[in-house]
Image: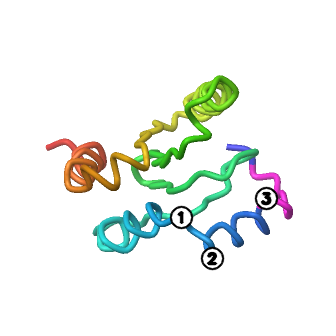
Amino acid sequence: MNNTHNQKLDTNAKMLRKNMTKEERHLWYDFLKMLPIVVHRQKVIEKYIVDFYVASAKVVIELDGSQHYDLVGKQADAARDAYLNSLGITVLRYSNADINLRFSSVCEDIWNRLKPSP
């Protein structure tokens, strides 16, 4: 990964950490924060800020609100995912509805994708 530093993205990431969505707070405080691995919130990865990043597994976890489901949002997400994939990073996407309605299933899916293979 490119180690160039983008101060504007760092500032935005800090603001996003302080103003997480309801769904981001739920996932963070009720699951990710308690995992026995390091999970970063609102992490800058080159030209993007990702919701959550697990460096040890090279996994990004994104929570998608309604703006991700229109044509522009889908195209932006596809380009972003392709870029992150080119860095060897896997992107896991869950909708806000998934968090609100199927929280334990989302947590189980995330854990199954993060835990090391035997």
Callout 2 amino acid: Lys
Which residue has dot 2 on it? 18
Q: Position of residue 15 (x, y in %)?
A: 71, 71
Callout 3 amino acid: Leu
Identify whether 92 is placed above or below 115. above
Is residue 31 shown left or right of residue 16? left
Which residue has dot 3 on it? 9
Which residue has dot 1 on it? 21
- Which residue occupies 61% across, 32% down? 77
Label 3 residue SS: helix
Color scheme of the displayed model? rainbow
Label 1 residue SS: loop
Sequence order check, earlier mark of 2 and 3: 3
Q: Mark 1, mark 2: which one is toward the viewer?
A: 1
Q: Position of residue 103 (x, y in %)?
A: 26, 55
Q: Position of residue 59 (x, y in %)?
A: 44, 45
Q: Position of residue 114 (x, y in %)?
A: 30, 49
76 and 111: which one is in front? 76
Residue 54 is covered by the magenta coloring: no
- Which residue occupies 42% across, 40% down? 92
Q: Mark 3, mark 1: which one is toward the viewer?
A: 1
Which of the image's four quarters has the C terminus? top left
Specify the segment rendered in magenta. 3-9
Task: Give the CA separation, mark 3 to mark 1.
Answer: 18 Å
The dot on residue 88 is: none
Is residue 112 shown left or right of residue 48? left
Label 2 residue SS: helix
